[in-house]
């Protein structure tokens, strides 16, 4: 029913951190997709059913096969970082839900609470990696 979501006990700062992390990752993921599109035209038509992990694997392969060795050496680290960050995003997105001592909901991964600081650090990493891929998309590829 309308507004049922408001019955979930969660504080605003935690919710903001989790939501921002997902938005930051989505931007990163699309930076990766656009790099793939620049390297392999029409790639974007294939992403509908691909996971972020598959997109990362594709970007690594496309970066490694790029004909200019200078681009390969500059893009490979960004592609590898995107692959690593897929796992970090998954640790947030696929975390278990639990009740924190304040009775509010929190995400836990392997029994460890994902704190706002941990989630904010992930968001910062997503944005930094996205900047690298975005730069390649717009200025190098």
Image: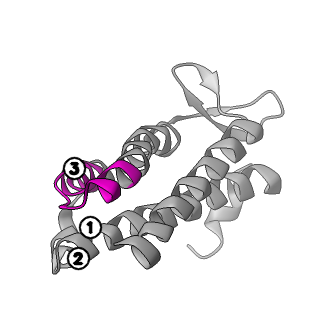
Q: Are marks 2 and 1 in contact (CB under 8 Å)?
A: yes
- Cα–Cα gap, marks 3 and 1: 12 Å
Task: Please name the residue that numbered disc 2 is placed on.
Answer: 44
From what the image shows, is residue 132 above or below residue 137? Answer: above
* Among the 4 quarters of the image, the one containing residue 122: top right
Relative to 35, 109 lies left or right: right
Crowd rating for badge 2 (residues with CA inside 10 Å; few <14, some 14–19, many 20+): some
Residue 101 seen in this snapshot: yes
* Along the line of sight, the residue nearer the viewer: 112 or 7: 112
Crowd rating for badge 1 (residues with CA inside 10 Å; few <14, some 14–19, many 20+): many
Badge 3 or badge 2: first in the primary sequence: 2
Task: Please name the residue that numbered disc 3 is placed on.
Answer: 64
Of badges 3 and 2, nearer the viewer stands 3
Q: Are marks 3 and 1 in contact (CB under 8 Å)?
A: no
Magenta run includes residue 80: no
Expressed as whole percent of the image width and height from the top left, the position of residue 34 reads: 34, 73
- The magenta segment: 54-74
Dominant SS in magenta: helix
């Amino acid at each position: 029913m309308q507004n049922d979501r408001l019955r979930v006990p969660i504080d605003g700062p935690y919710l903001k951190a989790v939501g921002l992390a997902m938005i930051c990752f989505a931007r990163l993921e699309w930076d990766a997709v656009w790099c793939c599109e620049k390297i392999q035209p029409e790639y974007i038509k294939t992403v509908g059913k691909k996971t972020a992990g598959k997109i990362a694997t594709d970007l690594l392969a496309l970066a490694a096969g790029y004909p200019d060795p200078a681009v390969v050496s500059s893009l490979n680290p960004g592609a590898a970082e995107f692959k690593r960050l897929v796992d970090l995003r998954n640790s947030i997105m696929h975390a278990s839900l639990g009740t924190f001592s304040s009775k509010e909901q929190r995400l836990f991964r392997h029994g460890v609470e994902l704190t706002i600081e941990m989630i904010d650090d992930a968001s910062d990493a997503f944005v930094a990696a996205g900047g690298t891929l975005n730069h390649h998309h717009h200025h190098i590829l």
